[in-house]
Image: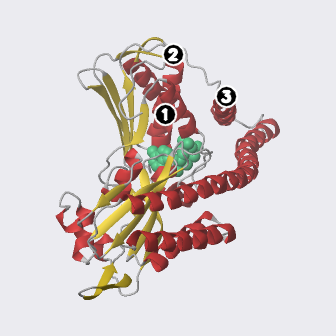
Amino acid sequence: MTLTVTEEPGGRVFHAFAHDITNARRAAQFADVQAAIALGLAQAHSSTVAGHRVVEALGMKMGWSVVELWLVDDHRQVLTCAARHVEAGQQLGDFALNVLELGVALPGQICADGTGRWIRDLSTDRASLRSSAAARVGLRVAVGVPVSTGRQTLGALCVYGNRVEDPENTLLGLLGGLAAHVGQYLERRRAEELALELARTKNEFVAMVTHELRNPLAVISGAVTVFDDELEELTTEQQREYLRIIARSAQRLSVMAEDLLDLARLESGHLAVELIDTELCAIIGESVQANTAPAAGKQLTVTVRLPERLDLLADPNRLRQVADNLLTNAIKYTPAGGEITITAGRVDTGQIITWTVADTGIGIPPAEQPRLFRRFYRASTALDNRIPGTGLGLVITRAIVERHHGTITLGEHTGPGTTFVVRLPATAIPADSDSSPRVPGT
Ligand code: ADP
């Protein structure tokens, strides 16, 4: 307040001027926070540590009760809470979620459309379950801004407090500036971490390929030795059995070689698909036929529910690869006596073909599902059960489906097992056209 006194004929007059310094104070506080965050980011040796420094600086210096940094996963399916600051004494109750779907709750909405939001009174935001949970633990107001690189939204920075405040642009602007700083840092860090991961993946790749090559080679050379040493004593049927063992191992090696070649083509952008008039039911039928023996060997029941025809413009050899990969996985990851169900049909007034492959096998833990389509990724269930594999098939399968402008996802599944859902457009698509019809959501 500025106070001046003037001498007037009628006596002294006091003039008091009150200045609203809220914004100036906030700007000064922000400058302080900015400096703390810049220092924190410079000293952090990983993006996890950096995330914690950011939320802590914002919470402590600005007095927000809860500050959260949410990041979108690589496949843009879910958000995870990378760091959370909670003021001492503040309860979280069922507000304390760590995973959200894109579009859900304040962080999910910000990541879905890339714009900041202000919820003035959380208790009146009845549409959101998380707002109600926040209101129950005394949080009144929420502000969130996107953390982006300019090209892509990486996540959201959200603050929650217990005073109802009026939305004002300064706070959103200042918070946005901080979030941009964090976005740039995360992008730089991700690039560095990716380079490290790539180097590690290369080593893992060499180890995996060597291991996977050795197994069938050992089987072949063992069978050849027995065949050679005991040729005279072996009955014709026994000789045939050894030849079958050799053929199966050679087949495994050739599938691996094909997968590795496809991976190389995929990485150089040359995974070709040749679209012609194709009928999907026949392709699925041929794949089921070809896999009868391995399924029967494990006493698996394979049920196929298909309409008479499903015509589409596609590459039949590539779709056969998809059919084989999904079915051989279902066989491989389902213990003896289990069931496999394959269905296909048209949905959305015939525009889309949905094709599902479900099994009653070992399943994939929900927390690991977002990583499923990464190169070399193998779920813990597969590793724990010591089931051999390379983690290449699904990457190639997804690339093929996407080259047909379709999608492949994990479907809803009740009970033990896994369901893969492939959705393909049934209409004609020029191979390299961008204006072609797509499965919604691609
Ligand atoms: P591979 O089977 O050679 O390891 P894929 O790329 O085909 O490679 O599959 C990647 C991983 O996904 C597998 O290692 C396994 O953990 C998991 N997976 C794929 N299909 C299934 C399934 N039907 N049931 C359970 N896990 C599966």
Residue type, mark 2 in image: Ala
Element type where label 3 sits in the image: helix
Against 308, residue 381 (above or below) is below
Q: Which residue is mark 3?
A: 265
Q: Which is nearer the eye, 191 or 306?
A: 191
**Can residue 414 be spotted in the picture?**
yes
Q: Is residue 389 above or below residue 96?
A: above
How many callouts does the rendering have? 3
Mark 3–mark 1 CB contact (< 8 Å): no
- Tell me the SS state at disc 1: helix
Whole-percent x and y of residue 86?
A: 41, 78
**CB atoms at circles 2 and 3 under 8 Å apart?**
no
Q: Is residue 383 visible?
A: no
Tag 2 secondary structure:
loop
Q: Nearer the viewer, mark 2 or mark 3?
A: 2
- Residue type, mark 3 in image: Arg
Return the residue nearer the eye: 428 or 29. Answer: 29
- Quadrant containing the C terminus in the rendered view: top left
- N-terminal of the pair, mark 2 or mark 3, is 3
Report, in whole angstroms, how far the alpha carbon at label 3 lies from the one at label 1.
31 Å
Judged left or right of residue 362, residue 126 is left
Q: Nearer the viewer, mark 3 or mark 1?
A: 3
Is 149 located above or below residue 105 in the figure?
above
Residue ID at (36%, 35%): 356
List x then y, in percent, for residue 254.
68, 31
* Residue under label 1: 293
- The single residue placed furthest to the bottom in the displayed view is 11
* Residue depicted at x 43% and y 49%: 336
Badge number at residue 431 = 2
352 sits left or right of 239 in the view: left
